[in-house]
């Protein structure tokens, strides 16, 4: 997967656009600034937006090319990111480091997903938040109709409501729902798709 993402992010354009995810934008701006971690952040569109909103921002991805693009976008907007490349357990983040974590299309491999979600929850301070949007299992039907909508081809990487409740059940869901949305995010997220969204708070 690292080679796949390096190849994708080596394209000159920002392949998922330069503006933040619509759901993240709509919910994130309701809260006061603090420290936030962006998981599998790619080219930095959401992280840069958060930094522009006066948050202290950290991010990670497995792709070196993603970091280059994110740092370029940060420079364009005159903000700073602490962007790290590698596997999550090896990146030096600690318990209670953050006031929030953002998981925007962070589809981790099945063999590490639960471990990563547990780690990310541990990084959040009490009363801290998780912002989440990811493709649901129902998205396969939309992909078959329109490959340009994007998303993981492996159904195991898509989320069910049951998996979300199992992985994040220790949190207080401020909202949690599944929806059909019309994606317009750069080159690789275009058209109708099925997603799960939530904002949750650590007890």
Image (cartoon, helix red, strand yellow):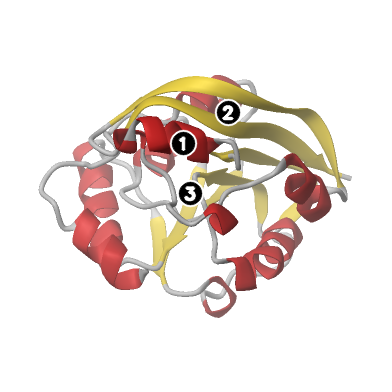
Tell me if mark 1 has few (under 14), some (14-19) or many (20+) residues whose alpha carbon lies within 10 angstroms of its own: many
The residue tagged 1 is 50
Residue 36 on image: x %, y %: 57, 47
- Quadrant assignment, res 131: top right
The residue tagged 2 is 28
C-beta proximity under 8 Å, tags 2 and 3: no
Residue 117 on image: x %, y %: 68, 60
Task: Determine whether 92 is above or below 127 in the image.
Answer: below
Most foreground residue, 61 or 15? 15
Give the position of the N terminus as an image quadrant. bottom left
Local secondary structure at mark 3: strand
Left or right: where does residue 146 sit relative to residue 34?
A: left
Determine the CA span between mark 2 and mark 1: 8 Å
User: N-terminal of the two: label 2 or label 1?
Assistant: 2
Could you tell me which residue is drawn at 23 percent across and 62 percent down? 65
C-beta proximity under 8 Å, tags 1 and 3: yes
Identify the mark at residue 57; answer none if there is no mark: 3
Could you tell me which residue is drawn at 42 percent across and 43 percent down? 47
Local secondary structure at mark 2: helix
Asked if residue 162 shows in the view, the reply is yes
Most foreground residue, 40 or 100? 40
């Amino acid at each position: 997967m690292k080679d796949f993402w390096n190849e994708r992010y080596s394209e000159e354009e920002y392949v998922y656009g330069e503006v933040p995810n619509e759901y993240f934008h709509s919910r994130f701006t309701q809260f006061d600034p603090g420290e936030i971690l962006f998981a599998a952040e790619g080219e930095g569109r959401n992280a840069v937006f958060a930094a522009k909103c006066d948050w202290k921002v950290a991010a990670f991805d497995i792709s070196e090319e993603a970091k280059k693009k994110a740092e370029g976008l940060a420079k364009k907007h005159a903000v700073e990111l602490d962007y790290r490349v590698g596997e999550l357990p090896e990146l030096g983040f600690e318990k209670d480091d953050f006031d929030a974590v953002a998981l925007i299309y962070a589809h981790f491999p099945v063999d590490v997903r639960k471990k990563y979600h547990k780690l990310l929850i541990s990084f959040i301070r009490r009363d801290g938040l998780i912002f989440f949007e990811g493709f649901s299992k129902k998205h396969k039907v939309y992909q078959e109709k329109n490959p340009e909508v994007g998303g993981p081809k492996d159904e195991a990487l898509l989320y069910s409501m049951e998996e979300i409740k199992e992985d994040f059940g220790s949190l207080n869901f401020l909202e949690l729902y599944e929806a059909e949305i019309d994606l317009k995010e750069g080159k690789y997220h275009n058209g109708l798709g099925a997603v799960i969204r939530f904002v949750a708070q650590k007890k």
